[in-house]
Amino acid sequence: MASLNHPADLKYSKTDEWVRVQGDQATIGITDYAQDQLGDVVYVEIPLTPGQQIGRDQKFGDIESVKATSELVAPISGEVLQINELLKDHPELVNEQPYGDGWMLVVKLSNPAELDDLMTAEQYIAYLEGR
Amino acid sequence: MTAEQAAAAPLKRTPLYEQHQALGARMVEFGGWEMPLQYSSILEEHRAVRTRAGLFDVSHMGEFQVEGPEALPFLQYLVPNDVGRLAINQALYTTLCLPTGGVIDDLLVYRLEAERYMVVVNAANIAKDLAWFQEQAQRFSALQIADRSQATALLALQGPEAQAILQPLASVDLATIRYYRCLPGSVAGLACLISRTGYTGEDGFELYCEAEQAPVLWERLLAAGKERGLVPAGLGARDTLRLEAGYCLYGHELTEQTNPLEAGLAWTVKFEKGDFIGREALLQVREQGPARKLMGLEMVERRVPRGGYTIYDSDTGGESGSSGANGRAIGVVTSGAPSPTLNKSIGMGYVEAARAIPERLVQVEIGDRRLAARLVTLPFYKRRK
């Protein structure tokens, strides 16, 4: 786990998503730990359209790796602003740049107080070690 | 590791455990063994085997030695394939069946000497198979069965570069070993049984050696193959490779509730050779025709069919093109993965015989949706010779 990267400026969920907050918007993706556990990602399916509302802890898509299918879970609630279209043809970006071009959603926060329930990088790393 | 796993029996390790650790392998539980899933990435290792070569540790597999004047009649009675046609240093693939025709395991049988055979069984089935062998052996007298699994390591060198990599280290001319043949010899000075067999759909060799010599053999092979692009490959790639090649995996396509005829293994059932366990049940299946058949599945979309998913009839009615969710369940997926070679999602599954028609459109239930798939004949991949 030593080589995995969990940047200090992000918030983390117990279901291994990260959140980057900029003003009233938040970008969501899956963590370096999550992509490493999944292995080669071959398909990301996010059946959402901009304008739709997603709720916290709600499933927002599926991610297929060579060995397994996993659900994507929203760490916060909000209105979908953008979906990463690049992932359609380049799912490997989730492995290569989980915090960069491998992002999944941008949402407009509907309840910023939810951010307080997420973990800091330090807390997330401690959480992973306790797993 | 969860508390549940920790409380269970400790996982067994192959003689190459330290090599896997040193290579940074991700280890997983498989059939009671702690085995390498991948070293770099399943896709990379898969492609290396298809284009260059990969080295697999499959020492978890079991090896039984069956020896004596009654070894042949015993094996002939035990398995549906015809062990009697094996020349010395030849192997065959067969199932091991219950009287019901259900599959206890699938095996390789090697004839090593006139009255000495080696039987290779799946790791998870070693204890079950050995008990079955010993029980059936009571009908025979001049026969010894020895479980050599612990003492034997097995490395699989697979891929188009396998022969070129192995030849400089080998004591025998590999060109003289044809498919499903073997020769005792040495590799890097270590005594091995060199067998031209595999589970990847590529040319390649399986090397049986003494367990304590496996680490040196492994390191020498990896070093010798480096220039030709040889990489260590794990069970993840082994599974996607065998799936593309259309090979059955015990516990998925083969179980005690499936028979070899529905699994597409009729070619391994030799009714004319005489009596064997399961013959009557299998004769009946042959007469009536199997109720279901193992088919390949190619997904139209990119979602991946996984073992256990239900296959539904497509109610397109031929021309209409509609794809409502009204078709009834006609089968079940047994294995599935994204195919790196075909660049689409593939699987295998059992489908009612009347619906098991190549090119027929069906639906696979994935999550809360039914997605279109095409039934195809196996294998998905055949290497050019």
Image: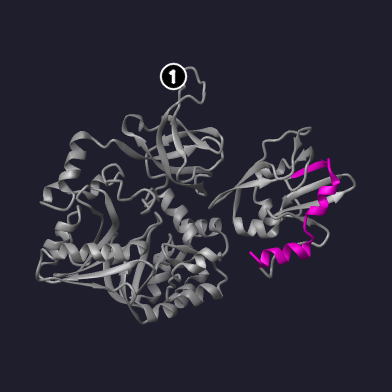
Please provide percent x and percent y for residue B26. Answer: 55, 66
Residue A58 picture quarter:
top right
In this figure, which residue is indicated by the disc labeled 1? B317
Please provide percent x and percent y for residue A62. Answer: 62, 43
Give the position of the N terminus of chain B as an image quadrant: bottom right
Q: Is residue B38 visible?
A: no
Please provide percent x and percent y for residue B309. Answer: 47, 41
Name the subunit of mark 1.
Answer: B
Q: Is residue B65 visible?
A: yes
**Vertical position of residue B225 compared to residue B319: above or below:** below
Residue at figure coordinates x 47%, y 56% from the top left = B50
Based on the picture, tell me whether residue B165 belongs to the magenta stretch: no
Based on the picture, tell me whether residue A125 belongs to the magenta stretch: yes
Sort mark 1 into few (<14), some (14-19) or many (20+) by Cα contacts within 10 Å: few
Q: Amino acid at mark 1?
A: Gly
**Which contiguous range is marked in magenta?**
A105-131
Camera-nearest residue between B319 and A73: A73
Residue at figure coordinates x 11%, y 52% from the top left = B275
Residue A37 picture quarter:
bottom right
Q: Secondary structure at mark 1?
A: loop
User: In the rendered view, does B165 fall on the left or right side of B276?
Assistant: right
Residue at figure coordinates x 41%, y 35% from the top left = B375
Residue B355 picture quarter:
top left
Q: How many numbered circles are shown?
A: 1
Camera-nearest residue between A114 and B47: A114
